[in-house]
């Protein structure tokens, strides 16, 4: 089996700040650590105070990676919360690198706005007050700006506004950084007030632990991101898992067989092969019987689900999804309600069976001395 060619062979053009690569016939700009090494990011950010506001999922990943990369980073979080305590146990020092939100907003020259998208609305008047000329407002999502009629987030004209959106969980961002790898992120500039928005945003992108950065705009980022997480990445995948598992169970298969044939084999054996070298290569490493069946059936699944994806994209583009997210996630008891729905998923038979299957993985078994 041939191994993949190194990425260099896909480069069409490369200059000091960017490379142009061929993505399946379309040329796009990307920035890698080749064009923009960490030393350059450190130089660009040497006089900045990067204030990470919020310490939920992205906050810790981005703040800790920047700290380890030698960036002058502080965290703004509400005192007396669990996440304040987490920031302390992660090494941020109250009064030195950890502050109440307003104090961090005052000190920061770059404001990384990493509250949940719904919470960003409530805090916006406070943030805006501290956006003095020349500061930068940094997001990890195009949500607040794109749906500004719903969020009311309209930044002053004399600050830079940009985003770096890691394409994965903040947990993965941190884990991959610690492994010496990098998670890919998109970047976009909404407003360049200082003339330095590009070098600022790329430096921050490298500093938070991106492996490479690809170009987008705020609207494209939020439309694709909301579609992806509701679609194949999270919503759709659970839907098709549940459908296949139910059919196997209804036909007399045991939970362990149904779970293994639906989830475990996918995550443990086959998806790593897809990640390594593409779908055709994974197929080529399965039996000809499996290949015949997969090639016969994939288009049927595509055709059955495409109308749902079209409905989903429309719901995103018309602002229905963002409005729903704002309405439900702004309620005082939103966390309890989300937790109850997660509990229902956790307690469903498929994921209970999964718990037992995972315990049987050799790496999860306790070895008796
Ligand atoms: N979760 C991810 O891995 C991920 C990935 C890519 C992009 N993003 C984006 O990054 C941003 C942050 O997302 P997140 O998932 O880390 O957020 P989150 O839901 O974990 O919340 C972040 C912080 O917001 C604080 N918070 C909530 N309500 C608040 C309020 N009313 N006042 C003050 N603080 C409040 C919480 O204490 C927490 O520290 C969002 O724009 C999100 O879309 C997240
Ligand atoms: C990690 C995801 C799903 O990619 C992100 O978009 C999020 O909203 O958490
Ligand atoms: Mg998202
Ligand atoms: Mg995402």
Image (tube, grey):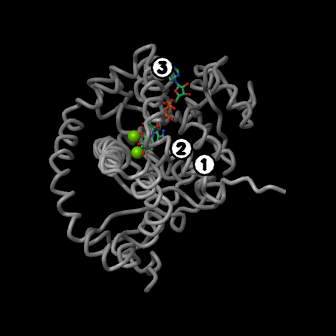
Q: Nearer the viewer, residue 242 or 64?
A: 242
Q: Element at badge 1?
A: helix
Residue drawn where x is 44% and y is 81% of the image: 5
Some atom of ligand 1 lies within 8 Å of the CB belonging to the residue at label 2: yes
Residue occupying the far front of the picture: 252
Vertical arrangement, residue 153 with respect to residue 3, above or below: above
Vertical arrangement, residue 293 with respect to residue 79, above or below: below
Q: Element at badge 2?
A: helix
Q: Nearer the viewer, residue 103 or 353?
A: 353
**To which residue does mark 2 refer?**
170
Some atom of ligand 1 lies within 8 Å of the CB belonging to the residue at label 1: no
x and y percent of residue 98 in the render? 69, 28
**To which residue does mark 1 refer?**
174
Distance between mark 3 and mark 2 Cα atoms: 22 Å
Labelled disc at residue 86: none
Taking 331 as reference, is 58 left or right?
right
Would you say the residues marked 2 and 1 are in contact, meaning their CB atoms lie under 8 Å apart? yes
**To which residue does mark 3 refer?**
336
């Amino acid at each position: 089996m041939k191994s993949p060619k190194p990425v260099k062979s896909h480069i069409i053009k490369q200059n000091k700040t960017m490379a142009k690569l061929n993505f399946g016939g379309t040329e796009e700009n990307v920035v890698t650590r080749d064009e923009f090494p960490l030393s350059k990011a450190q130089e660009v950010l040497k006089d900045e105070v990067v204030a990470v506001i919020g310490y939920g999922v992205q906050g810790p990943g981005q703040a800790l990676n920047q700290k380890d990369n030698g960036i002058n980073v502080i965290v703004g979080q509400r005192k007396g919360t669990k996440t304040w305590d987490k920031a302390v146990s992660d090494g941020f020092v109250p009064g030195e690198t950890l502050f109440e939100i307003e104090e961090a907003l005052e000190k920061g020259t770059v404001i990384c706005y990493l509250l949940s998208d719904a919470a960003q609305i409530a805090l916006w008047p406070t943030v805006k007050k501290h956006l003095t000329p020349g500061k930068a407002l940094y997001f990890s999502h195009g949500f607040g700006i794109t749906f500004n009629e719903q969020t009311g987030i309209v930044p002053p004209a004399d600050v830079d506004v940009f985003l770096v959106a890691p394409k994965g969980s903040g947990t993965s961002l941190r884990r991959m950084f610690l492994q010496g790898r990098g998670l890919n992120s998109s970047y976009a500039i909404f407003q360049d007030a200082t003339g330095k928005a590009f070098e600022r945003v790329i430096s921050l992108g490298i500093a938070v632990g991106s492996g490479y950065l690809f170009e987008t705009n705020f609207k494209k980022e939020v439309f694709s991101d909301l579609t992806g997480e509701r679609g194949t990445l999270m919503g759709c995948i659970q839907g098709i898992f549940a459908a296949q598992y139910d059919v196997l169970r209804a036909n007399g298969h045991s939970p362990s067989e149904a779970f293994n044939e639906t989830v475990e084999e996918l995550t443990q054996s086959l998806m790593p092969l897809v990640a390594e070298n593409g779908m055709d290569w994974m197929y080529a490493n399965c039996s000809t019987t499996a290949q015949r069946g997969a090639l016969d059936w994939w288009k049927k699944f595509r055709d059955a689900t495409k109308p749902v994806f079209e409905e989903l994209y429309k719901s995103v583009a018309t602002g229905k999804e963002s409005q729903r997210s704002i309405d439900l996630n702004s309620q005082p008891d939103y966390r309890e309600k989300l937790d109850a729905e997660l509990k229902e998923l956790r307690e469903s038979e498929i994921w209970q069976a999964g718990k037992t299957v995972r315990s049987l993985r050799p790496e999860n078994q306790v070895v008796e001395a």
